[in-house]
Structures are given as C-alpha cells and as structure tokens.
Amino acid sequence: MSAMIDGRARITGTRITVYDVLTYAEAGWHPSSIAGTLGVSTAQVKAVLDYVAQNREEVMKTYRAILARIERGNPPELEAKLQQSVERFRAKLRESEQRNGV
C-alpha cells in the first residue's frame, strides 16, 4: 500500500477514499481538477490513481459493489425512519415560524 493510502483505502490523513477519486477519474476528470474539487494535492490524486492501476481488479470489484449498493437505495425501514425525521423537522419549523410570526 502506498504511503499516501491508508489501510481503509483513504488518502492518508483525510476522509477521501480511493473510490471518491475513482468516481471523478472514471468520468474523465484531470488529476489536478480532482485534487481541487476534493481539497487534496495533485500528488495525492496521482498516488491514488497509481494505487488503482496496481490493484485494479480488487479496487474495481469493491467499486462496483459500492455502485450497486447506491443503486439499490436505502431499505424500506430506513426510508420510513428518514421520512419520520423529515416530518418531525417540518413540524418544529412550523412551530418556530408561528412563534416568531414568520
């Protein structure tokens, strides 16, 4: 593993993953544009791209699994909880607006 990539497939010292960088790279972005968007150095992005090139099969297998998980969306029970939270927030917002005469 590169010194710039930690054991969790992140750029060392950041929360930026190999898969975050890969998303932009797969879309054809230039390394310096990826770096600017993610707030890391171009050298860090190039280290990720080198890591991906050296471990392509393993990285792409995980990346495809991540994309499939995103495509499936949240399970129904989580969506229900999310909707309940949104409804509670909206009710509190209405109460606050009424109290403040908005």
Image: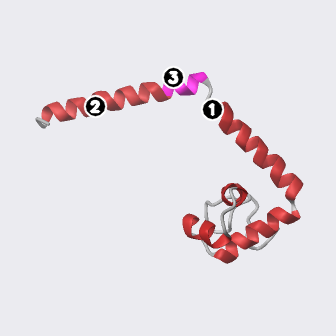
Q: What SS does tag 1 mark?
A: loop
Q: Is residue 19 left or right of residue 76?
A: right
Q: Earlier in the sequence, mark 3 or mark 2?
A: 3
Mark 3 → mark 2, Cα distance in angstroms? 19 Å
The circle on residue 92 is 2
x 69%, y 77%: residue: 43
x 61%, y 60%: residue: 15
Foreground label between 1 and 3: 1
Q: Is residue 37 left or right of residue 93?
A: right
The residues colored magenta run: 76-81
Q: What SS does tag 3 mark?
A: helix
Q: Quadrant location of residue 70?
A: top right
Foreground label between 1 and 2: 1
Q: Nearer the viewer, residue 68 or 28?
A: 28
The circle on residue 46 is none
Q: How is the image coloured?
A: secondary structure
Q: Earlier in the sequence, mark 1 or mark 2?
A: 1
Mark 1 → mark 2, Cα distance in angstroms? 27 Å
Query: Can you give x and y, in whole percent of width and height, for residue 57 in the image?
Result: 88, 53
Whether residue 80 appears in magenta in the rendering, the answer is yes
When the figure is inspected, residue 60 is found, relative to residue 33, above or below; the finding is above
Q: Identity of the amino acid at label 1?
A: Gly
Q: Identity of the amino acid at label 3?
A: Ala
Q: Identity of the amino acid at label 2?
A: Lys
x 48%, y 29%: residue: 82
Whether residue 68 appears in magenta in the rendering, the answer is no
The residue where tag 3 is placed is 80
The circle on residue 73 is 1
Query: Can you give x and y, in whole percent of width and height, for residue 83 in the image?
Result: 45, 26
